[in-house]
Amino acid sequence: MSYSKYCELIDGLCTLVGIGNPAALYSHAELTVDGEDCVLMHGGEYNEDGITVCCMFGEPPEENGDLIRQRLLEANLTAMQPGGMRYALNQSGGEVMLAGVVPLEALDPESLLALLARLAQNARQWRRHYFLGIDIEADACETDLGLSSSARTRRLS
């Protein structure tokens, strides 16, 4: 049941943005949204009613790298709302990502696209300051899913 809901969501997203053969994206959807790399996957057996959403932020610069990673952990602490996104490091290359599991029932294709667009905006914002010299609580990238806000349509490339 929930996997079929996930597939319907991917079908709808592909229809919305004009991607053919949505079935090819069911197991692992790698998309570029507003110039940023994003990944969608079904929540799997441990979270079958959810969709895993990730946006790749890039690797932190070597200069101040340890401090930047510490700031990411601090940002995770300030964003501890249930169902929120969390910062992580991709184990294969050290790339920073913002990821979370979103309940399938909370999404439709338009709101999923709007969420991906917000995550892409967050990636660009993070690369401007890497959380250095800012107040994490006031100025860190938005990690609240904001699913109740109106969806904006953006084209995927």
Image (cartoon, helix red, strand yellow):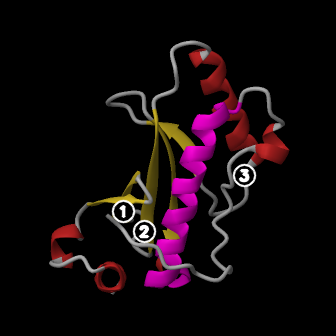
What whole-number distance in Å separates the C-alpha atoms at marks 3 and 2?
19 Å
Can the viewer see residue 103? no
Decide which of tag 3 and tag 2 comes sooner along the chain: 2
- Mark 2 Cα within 10 Å, few/some/many (few <14, many 20+)? many
Which quadrant of the structure image shows residue 66?
A: top right
Can the viewer see residue 61? yes
Which quadrant of the structure image shows residue 24?
A: bottom left
- At x 35%, y 28%, the residue is 93
Locate residue 65 relative to residue 140 in the image: left or right.
Answer: left
Decide which of tag 1 and tag 2 comes sooner along the chain: 1
Amino acid identity at mark 3: Met
The image position of residue 121, as x and y in percent, is 57, 55
Front position in the image: 47 or 147? 147
- At x 69%, y 29%, the residue is 71
Indicate the secondary structure of the residue bearing disc 2: strand
Indicate the secondary structure of the residue bearing disc 1: strand
User: Which residue is under mark 2?
Assistant: 51
User: Which residue is under mark 3?
Assistant: 80
Residue 127 falls within the magenta-colored stretch: yes
